[in-house]
Image (cartoon, rainbow, N blue to C red):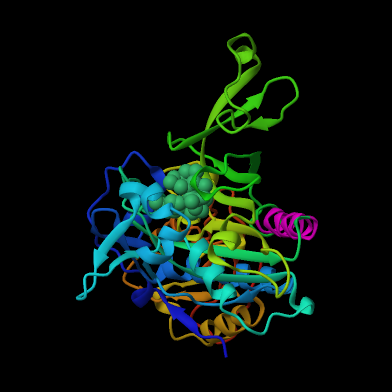
């Protein structure tokens, strides 16, 4: 059963105005999507949580469609396991470490290649028919970033979707890699309708052979890609056997971006060290695939928002799909129930009744516009019709508010 959400409960603002250089971060704080906890750590408020839940649902549907299975691994890892791939030291100061009461060195997992490889190494039921084995989780990751900033964009705790795939040989692993990259394209381009930039990338500390990064344009200087002015292709110069020669630099334009996803064909680096293999066969061939789920929230707003007055999110992940705004004198009108129940039947992304009748209709329309709610249903006198530029607006207004014979009109 769909529930009509109430604005009075859902909109929890109160944080002081943010002075961040990031417009997305400012909008998220000021409109009650997130609230700061301590350095690089944030709480999601109900509106922000709804966006994240929608993102997770999209990822679950799209990855399970191709046969990936969801798991949950511990967020605490052991130095013992990380030492097997020599990555405890390689991760350096970014690794958040601590000791248990027996002085065992532990970490809050920044990523989970070792843990997932170990999980598979310990399975005794591997059969050929299980391949490709595709396991993913969506959970918190921890990195003691040198410079946590811009809220969820670079935080010390963040939500990541991380998938690890296992194949019998390199050719099959490359097919798996391509299949999952196609799902990435579908999620970013078709479902979220984003202008995502895919570039060949550096495998960095993860190791491996092939790697791609997915970037969104950003006005922050978090990352960059180079665009060839003549052929319009994108490169990441640090990744492509390195730097663009000086003579060619004028052919490229550097644009600021933020990385929202990263995929790797890892090969056998982890499976060899940790012993993940098929009985009587060589080490399994692995790929891994990350998406910065919580980073997507500010990154998408940064990419789509043009005015500091209003958040813009893709319809698929807007916190609410429609708001019903009712003029105070009509709050008890039968049309309120009819409108909200019809809207909840057809709009599955959540319908909110803006029951804050002490606030004028015009101000509530402005609030809905600011929150990036795609559809605004106004139930008011015809004289109170109001348009929000660039926003599809269904107006349902009463011509005779005092009578029971009110006639709804709709414009889209
Ligand atoms: P960056 O280059 O921005 O530091 P990364 O290359 O270190 O990111 P990966 O190890 O590839 O990140 O992790 C997968 C994804 O997790 C990234 O593509 C990004 O979207 C997200 N991510 C990484 N670090 C953070 C962070 N500190 N806060 C929020 N999201 C992050
Ligand atoms: Mg990093
Ligand atoms: Mg990176
Ligand atoms: Mg990366």
Judge left or right: residue 167 versus residue 357. right
Q: At which x and y percent is residue 248?
A: 64, 13
Q: Which residues are magenta?
A: 171-187
Compare residues 369 and 253 and report the one nearer the observer. 253
Tell me the quadrant of the picture where the N terminus can be found. bottom right
Q: Residue at x 38, y 65 (%)?
A: 80
- Farthest residue to the front: give it: 280
Is residue 186 shown in magenta? yes
- Farthest residue to the top: give it: 247
Q: Residue at x 53, y 52 (%)?
A: 388
Tell me the quadrant of the picture where the C terminus can be found. bottom right
Q: Quadrant of residue 217 in the image? A: top right
Q: Residue at x 53, y 86 (%)?
A: 337
Is residue 334 visible to us here?
Answer: yes
Is residue 322 visible to us here?
Answer: no
**Vertical side of 337 occupied by 189: above or below:** above
Q: At which x and y percent is residue 247?
A: 62, 8
Q: At which x and y percent is residue 251?
A: 66, 15
């Amino acid at each position: 059963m769909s529930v009509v959400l109430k604005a009075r409960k859902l909109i929890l603002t109160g944080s002081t105005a943010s002075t961040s250089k990031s417009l997305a971060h400012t909008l998220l704080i000021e409109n009650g999507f997130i609230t700061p906890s301590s350095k690089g750590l944030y709480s999601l408020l109900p509106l922000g949580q709804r966006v994240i839940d929608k993102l997770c649902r999209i990822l679950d549907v799209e990855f399970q469609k191709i046969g990936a299975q969801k798991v949950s691994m511990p967020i605490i890892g052991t130095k013992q396991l990380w030492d097997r791939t020599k990555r405890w030291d390689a991760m350096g100061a970014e690794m958040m470490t601590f000791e248990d009461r027996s002085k065992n060195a532990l970490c809050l997992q920044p990523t989970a290649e070792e843990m997932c490889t170990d999980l598979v190494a310990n399975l005794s039921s591997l059969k050929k028919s299980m391949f490709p084995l595709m396991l993913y989780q969506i959970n918190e990751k921890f990195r003691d970033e040198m410079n946590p900033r811009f809220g969820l964009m670079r935080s010390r705790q963040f939500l990541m979707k991380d998938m690890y795939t296992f194949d019998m040989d390199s050719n099959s692993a490359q097919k798996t890699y391509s299949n999952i990259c196609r799902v990435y394209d579908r999620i970013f381009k078709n479902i979220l309708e984003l202008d995502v930039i895919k570039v060949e990338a550096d495998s960095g500390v993860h190791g491996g052979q092939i790697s791609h990064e997915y970037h969104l344009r950003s006005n922050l200087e978090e990352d960059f890609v180079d665009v060839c002015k003549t052929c319009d292709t994108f490169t990441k110069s640090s990744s492509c056997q390195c730097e663009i020669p000086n003579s060619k630099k004028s052919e490229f334009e550097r644009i600021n971006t933020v990385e929202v996803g990263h995929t790797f064909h890892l090969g056998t680096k982890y499976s060899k060290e940790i012993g993940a293999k098929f009985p009587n066969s060589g080490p399994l061939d692995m790929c891994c695939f990350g998406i910065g789920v919580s980073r997507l929230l500010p990154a998408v707003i940064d990419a789509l928002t043009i005015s500091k007055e209003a958040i813009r999110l893709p319809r698929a992940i807007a916190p609410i799909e429609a708001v019903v705004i009712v003029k105070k004198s009509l709050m008890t009108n039968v049309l309120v129930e009819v409108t909200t129940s019809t809207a909840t039947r057809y709009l599955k992304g959540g319908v909110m009744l803006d029951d804050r009748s002490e606030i004028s209709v015009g101000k509530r329309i402005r609030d809905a516009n600011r929150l990036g709610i795609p559809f605004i249903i106004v139930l008011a006198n015809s004289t109170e019709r109001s348009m929000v530029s660039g926003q599809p607006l269904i107006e349902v207004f009463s011509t005779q508010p005092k009578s029971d014979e009110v006639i709804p009109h709709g414009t889209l």
